[in-house]
Amino acid sequence: MFNVELIGTGSCIPEKVVTNDDLAKIVDTSDEWITSRTGIKERRISTGETTTELAVGAARSALESARISAEDLDLIIVATLTPDDYLPSTACQVQKHIGADNAACFDLNAACTGFIYGLTVASQFIRTGMYKTALVIGAEELSKITDWTDRTTCVLFADGAGAAVLQRGEQQGIISEIIGSDGNKGDCLTCPALPPRNYFIRDDSTKESRSEYVYMNGREVYKFAVTVMPECILKTLEGTGISLSDIDHIIPHQANLRIIDAAAKKLNLDASKFYVNLPRFGNTSGASIPIALDEMAKANRFKKGDLIILVGFGGGLTYGAMLIKWTMGE
């Protein structure tokens, strides 16, 4: 089995900043209401940028960071629940735009845990020797599935993309990972696709209208998240010889500040251990962790040898975490 290192990060976000005060002009809400319940102050919203365009921007940024060519990629995985098309996949469209002619490409959907799922899948291909270099992207345009008349959800979601390059290396960069799901709770966070409809279906009941927007039972998602996040963090440490006190940084899915604070308390950790950019970017689903990762990397927040845990949860319901040793830098 080969070692896997993270060798580059990137991100791409829309230019349009939408503040809480801006939303107060659209729905019955206020800056105080949103901030006190979520921790969000503003978010980036597409004014025409597509999921593919955001993914391509993050991909190019990550390749530049990794100092490799797109032709060096063996694999591209895009984690998204908001693709522009059913087919071709977003990953194949990214391949076309960046010229990664040698890569196998596919999308996966694990909602807000998607980036961790993508890293986990890509690392297995590299560990077994099938591939050497992989690009994993989390990209979302949640604004197109958001009901902008529903103040309980429209204040949360945002658009953006983040990416990371993994490569076979001499050091063990990715130390451990855990992914899982609980489909029994899937109805807590949903967004419907097309219903069964074809020439042979004559039952008019299939023509009933279905919402095209995301729905969330916030109370149930909160209960799930504050339980599963600490559990995932601790499970990634099992059998590694690494303790929680050894961890330098935790990068959680940026969903709600209350959830992050509750997880920190359950682990008896100072909240400062958790990196938070939620107030500025909102919840970008599968893009939130890689955007935060790239922001920290670009700000030189990591030093070589730092131990980092990525942890997320999302629709499915899904969950996952990954323990990484930072191998870049001096």
Image (tube, helix red, strand yellow):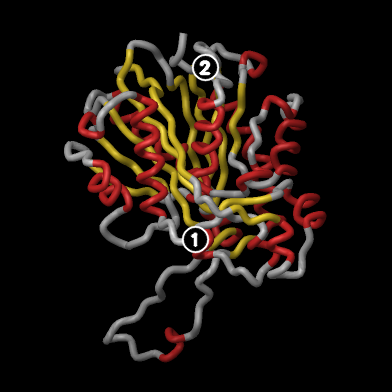
Whether 79 is drawn above or below 190: the answer is above
Instruction: Give the residue drawn at x 50%, y 12%.
Output: 304
Whether 155 is drawn above or below 325: the answer is below
Type of amino acid under label 1? Thr
Residue projecting furthest to the front:
15
The answer to whether marks 1 and 2 mark residues whose Cβ atoms lie closer than 8 Å is no
Q: Quadrant of residue 173?
A: top left
Which label sits on residue 239? 2
Label 2 sits on a secondary structure element that is loop
Label 2 neighbour load within 10 Å: few <14, some 14-19, many 20+: few
In this image, 125 relative to 22: left or right? left
Read off the residue under disc 1: 47
Type of amino acid under label 2? Gly
Label 1 sits on a secondary structure element that is loop
Whether 321 is drawn above or below 44: the answer is above
Instruction: Give the residue drawn at x 56%, y 40%.
Output: 312
Who is closer to the viewer here, 279 or 221?
279
Residue 246 pos. (x, y %): 62, 13
Query: Disc 1 vs disc 2: which is toward the camera?
Result: 1
Who is closer to the viewer here, 90 or 270?
90
Residue 99 pos. (x, y %): 21, 41
Residue 179 pos. (x, y %): 48, 37
Which label sits on residue 309? none
